[in-house]
Image (cartoon, grey):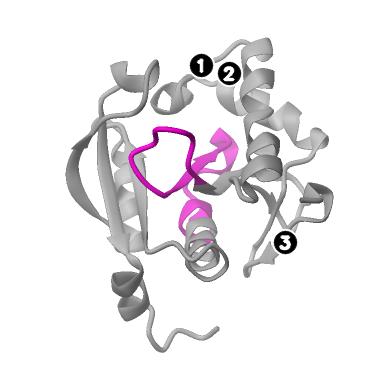
Amino acid sequence: MDIANGPVIETERLILRVPRIEDFERYAQMFAHESSIHIGGPLLRGDAWRRFLQMPGAWLLQGFGMFSVVEKSSGQWVGQGGPWQPDGWPGTEVGYAFHPDARGKGYATETCTAAIDWAFDALGWSEVIHCIAPANAASQAVARRLGSSRRGPGVLPPPLDVHEVDIWGQTREQWRARHAGRAQ
């Protein structure tokens, strides 16, 4: 797959595209912030670099990964969101993580709505899940806004199995029924 020319999705306020090297600085800032505790942070810059490389690798080898999310009005990288399914993962996830200065603006919901549509249409997924730390109330609120419900505790593959997660999710049929009649 030529990931440089991967899919681009535009929403009202955002552009979702394959990660680029210029995204790293704000990605590293996001993972250095104490609020990244629920997504494996805070991380030192070198650790953030190694994690950053996961998404281009997923795009190259699996044909999908989380999109870099860019704010249309500023051209600034604000986060990542989209399909994610590493080996041993508990399901077909649409995940999300946003820079601290981009939170509270509805970007996660906007991103995930577009990414879920894409995962169902382009990847043929039959369901999406979100692996969420039980203490992460903000992420749970996003999942609820997306129409997902808590399915119960989940287990991530080692070495991540030491982290407690709840699985939230919904089927393609539930998603489509909820979004029937939405302007395309």
Q: Is residue 130 above or below residue 48?
A: below
Percent of width and height locating residue 134: 24, 32
Q: Is residue 76 above or below residue 17?
A: above
Residue density around tag 3, few if under 14, some if 14–19, many if 20 or more, within 10 Å: few
Q: CA distance from mark 1 to mark 2?
A: 5 Å
Q: Residue type at mark 3: give it.
A: Val
Callouts 1 and 2 close, C-beta under 8 Å: yes
Viewer-nearest of discs 3 and 1: 3
Q: Which residue is mark 2?
A: 32
Residue 115 is covered by the magenta coloring? no
Q: Which residue is mark 1?
A: 42
Q: CA distance from mark 3 to mark 1?
A: 29 Å
Secondary structure of residue under mark 3: loop
Viewer-nearest of discs 3 and 2: 3
Q: Is residue 21 left or right of residue 42?
A: right
Percent of width and height locating residue 21: 81, 33
> Which residue is at the far bottom?
181
Q: Which residues are drawn in magenta?
A: 84-110
Percent of width and height locating residue 106: 48, 56
Q: In percent of the image, x 47 and y 25: which residue is there?
A: 36
Of 13 and 111, nearer the camera is 111
Residue density around tag 1, few if under 14, some if 14–19, many if 20 or more, within 10 Å: some
Residue 96 is covered by the magenta coloring? yes
Q: In percent of the image, x 74 and y 45: which residue is there?
A: 76
Q: Is residue 135 left or right of residue 34?
A: left
Q: Residue type at mark 1: give it.
A: Pro
Q: In percent of the image, x 67 and y 44: which residue is there?
A: 59
Q: Which residue is mark 3?
A: 8
Percent of width and height locating residue 101: 58, 38
Q: Residue type at mark 2: give it.
A: Ala
- The mark nearer the N terminus, 3 or 1, is 3
